[in-house]
Image (cartoon, rainbow, N blue to C red):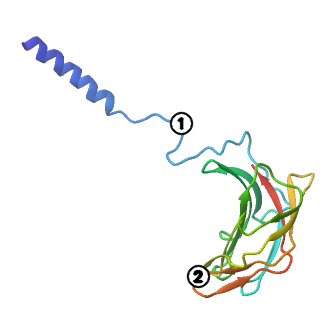
């Protein structure tokens, strides 16, 4: 009986010691590998010019223009998205974000018309979060450039509301030159 207790004590000690060690991982906790094969170079040809009736003119060009176009999957569906923002590098009163996305299997080129049931648009402006309310079609022209950017010209104004009665209207022809990510 003493031998069995002794063997069980040794096995239990070995199990406790093996479970108490730190994990030896090469990846930091919380890090998600975006799957890029190499580092991305910031493209200096990016730009955007958006005019919001109560938020002013939002125009930036060059390396500091945070504007991308992407093709990605979410909830087993593939989407094309266009995103522009200056949330990180602007004063509190002029911070904004503009995002539009719709289901697609590739980034389209040429004239694109999206009905109100096909797209989602969200804007953060002057501390408020807005979404589209005009329920109308959005027409845009998307042209790929030779430097992995896309010229995007929206040919219609978009009306937004924040749900509290505040509205925001985009200028008649917002333009974006977005870098393809990834």
The answer to whether residue 134 is left or right of residue 21 is: right
| Residue at screen point 86% across, 58% down | 150
Q: Which label was assigned to residue 26?
A: 1
Would residue 42 be seen by someone viewing this image from the given angle? Answer: no
Q: Closer to the camera, 44 or 130?
A: 130
User: How far is mark 2 from mark 1, CA to CA?
Assistant: 46 Å
Would residue 122 be seen by someone viewing this image from the given angle? Answer: yes
Closer to the eye: label 2 or 1: 2
The quarter of the picture where residue 37 lies is top right
Q: Give x and y (percent) for residue 164.
A: 57, 85
**Mark 2 highlights which residue?**
163
**Crowding near pointer 1: few (<14 within 10 Å), some, many (20+)?**
few
**The N terminus lies in which quarter of the figure?**
top left
Work out whether 145 lies above or below 140. Answer: above
Q: Give x and y (percent) for residue 50.
A: 80, 76
The quarter of the picture where residue 81 lies is bottom right
Work out whether 29 lies above or below 43. Answer: above
| Residue at screen point 26% across, 23% down | 14
Q: Closer to the camera, 31 or 125?
A: 125
Secondary-structure class at tag 2? loop
| Residue at screen point 58% across, 46% down | 32
Q: Which label was assigned to residue 53?
A: none
**Crowding near pointer 2: few (<14 within 10 Å), some, many (20+)?**
few
The answer to whether residue 111 is left or right of residue 40 is: right
Secondary-structure class at tag 1? loop
Work out whether 159 lies above or below 30. Answer: below
Q: Give x and y (percent) for residue 176.
A: 83, 67
Q: Closer to the camera, 58 or 152?
A: 152
Q: Give x and y (percent) for residue 60.
A: 81, 72
């Amino acid at each position: 009986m003493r031998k069995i207790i002794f063997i069980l004590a040794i096995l239990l000690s070995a199990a406790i010691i093996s479970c108490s060690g730190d994990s030896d991982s090469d990846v930091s906790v919380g890090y998600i590998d975006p799957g890029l094969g190499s580092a991305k170079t910031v493209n200096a040809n990016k730009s955007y010019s958006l005019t919001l009736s109560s938020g002013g003119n939002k125009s930036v060009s060059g390396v500091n223009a945070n504007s991308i176009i992407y093709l990605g999957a979410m909830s087993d569906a593939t989407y094309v998205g266009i995103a522009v923002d200056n949330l990180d590098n602007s004063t509190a009163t002029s911070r904004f974000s503009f995002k539009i996305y719709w289901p697609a299997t590739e980034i389209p080129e040429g004239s694109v018309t999206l009905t109100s049931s096909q797209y989602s648009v969200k804007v953060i402006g002057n501390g408020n979060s807005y979404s589209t309310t005009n329920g109308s079609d959005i027409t845009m022209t998307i042209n790929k450039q030779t430097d992995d950017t896309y010229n995007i010209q929206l040919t219609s104004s978009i009306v937004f509301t924040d749900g509290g009665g505040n509205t925001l209207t985009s200028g008649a022809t917002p333009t974006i030159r977005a870098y393809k990510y990834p």
